Image (cartoon, rainbow, N blue to C red):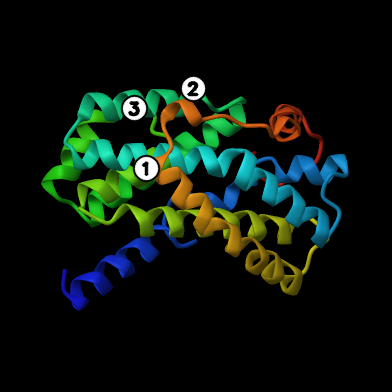
């Protein structure tokens, strides 16, 4: 791959995972709003601890594993395998809100990418995923269809996940921009090892230990005052 091709792939990846991509990520807090309401997140230190758990013991770890397997299935032109990975990803969502969060963003991502960056392999991916699509599966499948290297996709997806939740924290928690920036910087060092581990993990390695997030997402469905959909 030439330098220009590498640069073009990087720019495409940053466009796909930028806050401006039309997936509606700004509408979701991934349980963070419920954690603020419950008093689990009250400032910078508790936010960093909460996010660290979500990344290393919860949703992000699972997302990266699912993304890696979706990428492999798309690269190998395995529509049946890809559909099975997507079914598993959707089934892992522990609540109605978190299912909506991943499926709405996944569907929006796949449709937007198919419209803006079409290619025959991506058309095959879309045919294999006609209904609800989990967000990490959509990203991994699209990247695989475009022949993008899996490692950088995992790395940037992980960073975008953290940045999205920190952005939510700036709106929902008593955390300012400086504290949010420090939180992103502190967690960034943990993301690359997490992504490398996901590259070799099997689907049997999926699992979460973030029970307060899961329970909080149920409570958030009836939370009196809220600004996010999850």
> Which residue, as the protein is rendered here, is positioned at the far left?
120
Residue 85 versus residue 209: which sits nearer the camera?
209
CA gap, disc 1 to disc 3? 21 Å
Q: Residue at x 46, y 54 (%)?
A: 157
Q: Which mark is residue 68?
A: 1
Percent from the top left, x then y, of residue 129? Answer: 29, 30
Percent from the top left, x then y, of residue 227? Answer: 71, 47
Q: Which mark is residue 9?
A: none
Q: Which mark is residue 131?
A: 3
Residue 56 versus residue 160: which sits nearer the camera?
56
**Image position of 174 (left or right of 197):** right
**Image position of 52 (left or right of 46):** left
**Image position of 220 (left or right of 9):** right
Q: Which residue is under mark 2?
A: 91
Task: Nearest to the eye among marks 2 and 3: give it.
Answer: 2
Vertical relation: 135 (above or below) 3: above
Secondary structure found at label 3: loop
Looking at the image, tell me whether mark 2 or mark 3 is earlier in sequence order: 2
CA gap, disc 2 to disc 3? 14 Å
CA gap, disc 2 to disc 1? 17 Å
Q: Residue at x 71, y 35 (%)?
A: 213
Q: Residue at x 65, y 46 (%)?
A: 29
Vertical relation: 95 (above or below) 164: above
Residue 90 visible here: yes
| Label 3 crowd (10 A; few <14 / some 14-19 / many >=20) | few
Secondary structure found at label 1: helix
């Amino acid at each position: 791959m030439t330098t220009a091709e590498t640069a073009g792939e990087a720019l495409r990846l940053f466009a796909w995972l930028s806050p401006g991509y039309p997936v509606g990520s700004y509408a979701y807090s991934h349980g963070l709003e419920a954690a603020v309401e419950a008093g689990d997140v009250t400032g910078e230190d508790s936010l960093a601890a909460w996010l660290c758990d979500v990344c290393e013991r919860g949703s992000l770890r699972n997302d990266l594993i699912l993304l890696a397997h979706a990428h492999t299935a798309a690269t190998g032109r395995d529509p049946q395998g890809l559909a099975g990975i997507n079914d598993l990803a959707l089934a892992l969502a522990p609540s109605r809100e978190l299912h909506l969060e991943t499926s709405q963003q996944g569907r929006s991502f796949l449709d937007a990418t198919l419209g803006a960056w079409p290619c025959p392999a991506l058309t095959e991916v879309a045919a294999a995923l006609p209904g609800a699509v989990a967000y990490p599966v959509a990203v991994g499948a699209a990247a695989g269809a475009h022949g993008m290297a899996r490692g950088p996709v995992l790395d940037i997806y992980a960073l975008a996940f953290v940045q999205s939740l920190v952005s939510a924290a700036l709106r929902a928690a008593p955390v300012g921009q400086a504290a949010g920036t420090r939180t992103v910087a502190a967690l960034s060092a943990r993301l690359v090892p997490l992504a490398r581990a996901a590259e070799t993990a099997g689907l049997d390695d999926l699992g979460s230990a973030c029970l307060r997030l899961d329970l909080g997402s149920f409570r958030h469905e009836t939370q009196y005052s809220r600004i996010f959909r999850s």
